[in-house]
Image: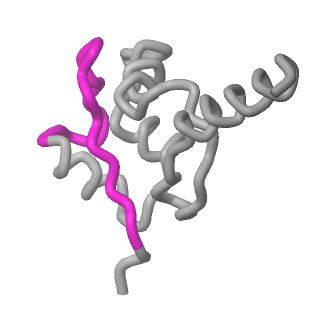
Amino acid sequence: MRPTALLVCLSGLALGASCAVNPATGHKELALVSESQEIQMGLSADPSMTVEEFARANPGPVPVATVALGNSMDPGDRFAAGSLAKRIVGDPLP
């Protein structure tokens, strides 16, 4: 096997190994960072985000008050630096 063909095959295998299923779409996507790294990057970008700002930036099927309740906070409270925010996903509520 020629070196170029081998390099192409190995590159394809490496890219295939770094694919992950996107939970929102169900499709495989190239994942350059893990889910936990992605969450950390999002919170470290703006650690002083309020629950209301978080809900606007990450829309879901429930009102802001429910997002706040799920995070044991009030809607106007700010997340502590480095904390993980809980997002509520799924189908809209009836």
- The foreground one among 30 and 8 is 8
Residue beneath the point at 64% across and 33% down: 15
Q: Residue furthest front?
A: 1
Determine whether 57 is above or below 39 in the image.
below
Residue beneath the point at 46% across and 18% down: 41
Q: Residue 87: image x %, image y %?
A: 33, 48
Determine whether 29 is above or below 81 in the image.
below
**In the shown orientation, is residue 70 left or right of residue 25?**
left
Q: Residue furthest bottom?
A: 94
- Of the 4 image quadrants, the one containing the N terminus is top right
Q: Residue 13: image x %, image y %?
A: 62, 35
Q: Residue 7: image x %, image y %?
A: 77, 21
Residue beneath the point at 73% across and 33% down: 9
- Of the 4 image quadrants, the one containing the C terminus is bottom left
Q: Residue 67: image x %, image y %?
A: 28, 51
Determine whether 93 is above or below 15 in the image.
below
**In the shown orientation, is residue 53 left or right of residue 87?**
right
- Displayed quadrant of residue 79: top left
What is the magenta range? 72-90
- Displayed quadrant of residue 18: top right
Q: How many marks?
A: 0
Residue beneath the point at 47% across and 24% down: 42
Query: Is residue 79 a member of the stretch shown in magenta?
Result: yes
- The foreground one among 14 and 80 is 14
- The foreground one among 65 and 1 is 1
- The foreground one among 19 and 53 is 19
Query: Is residue 75 a member of the stretch shown in magenta?
Result: yes
- Please name the predominant secondary structure of the magenta segment in the image: loop
Q: Residue furthest left?
A: 72
- Displayed quadrant of residue 61: bottom left
Q: Tell me how the rendering is colored.
A: one colour
**In the shown orientation, is residue 64 left or right of residue 71?**
right
